[in-house]
Amino acid sequence: MEPVHIVIMGCGRVGSGLALALDKRGHSVAVIDRDPHAFRRLGPHFRGRSIKGVGYDRQVLAKASIVEADGFAAVSSGDNSNILAARVVRESYGVHNVVARIYDPGRAEVFERLGIPTVATVRWTTDQMLRRLLPEGSEPVWRDPTGAVRLIEVRVHPHWVGRRISEMQAAAATPIPMLQRQGQGMITNERTVFQDGDLAYAAVETGRTPDVEVILGRPPVKR
């Protein structure tokens, strides 16, 4: 996959781990934290940028090249700061691929309704964050014992919003049996329309996983 630029707010255990994982995969990374000592967690071999400040400050975001960002992760220690930064980046800079870490699961449900995917601390893993930031390379949510079939949470390009799930299934040539919408799971049917903030789950043959991720991670092909 082609390298992408990801901006991360928060250089604690989660943010630094995420930054190092992205950097190791060859992606461009900018990390924001109000405490300059936090950048020590990145180590001497980190190739990205370290920027002192908060992720909702426009000057700080400019230094992080937010206008070039393909994704933004708000993983500081404060729920309010994470949500504020996520909303500023999404609404002011048009970065649709945004995810926020939330400590309070009750709050997480509220912000999911605003179209901002959230990951509550109790179920956080680096893989979950990576699945929501990167268009390819996701880990399966479920796989059958033989490894032939898997259910993956797949990143969908914003241009699919407003399209029927049936169109997405036809383009990817694979079933999309369920969505997560506003924090709630739902089974899809032929009339289901993909909405902003939805998380899509595709059932794929293992060998076709990269193809499905690429197709849904790009805008629909005009016919």
Image (cartoon, rainbow, N blue to C red):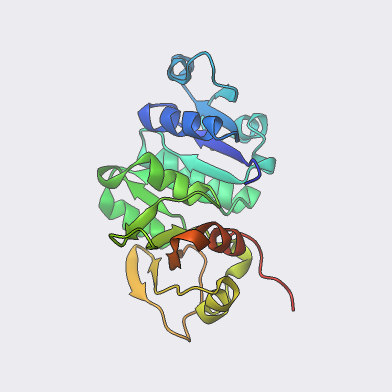
Decide which of 118, 3 is in the foreground and name it: 3
Q: Which image quadrant for residue 2?
A: top right
Q: From the viewer's perspective, is 49 left or right of 189?
A: right
Is any part of residue 55 visible from this angle?
no
Question: Is 185 placed above or below 107 here?
Answer: below
Residue 36 at what x, y percent from top left?
49, 16
Q: From the viewer's perspective, is 205 left or right of 70?
A: left
Q: Which image quadrant for residue 179?
A: bottom left
Decide which of 34, 202 is in the foreground and name it: 202
Q: Quadrant of the C terminus?
A: bottom right
Is any part of residue 215 visible from this angle?
yes
Question: Is 189 placed above or below 103 here?
Answer: below
Q: Residue furthest bottom?
A: 191
Residue 124 at what x, y percent from top left?
32, 43
Question: Is 27 placed above or below 40 here?
Answer: below
Q: From the viewer's perspective, is 64 left or right of 115?
A: right
Looking at the image, which residue is at 57% across and 45% down?
Answer: 71
Q: Residue furthest right?
A: 223
Question: Total of numbered circles in the picture?
Answer: 0
Residue 207 at what x, y percent from top left?
49, 60
Looking at the image, which residue is at 36% across and 48% down?
Answer: 119
Decide which of 53, 193 is in the foreground and name it: 193
Residue 68 at what x, y percent from top left?
69, 41
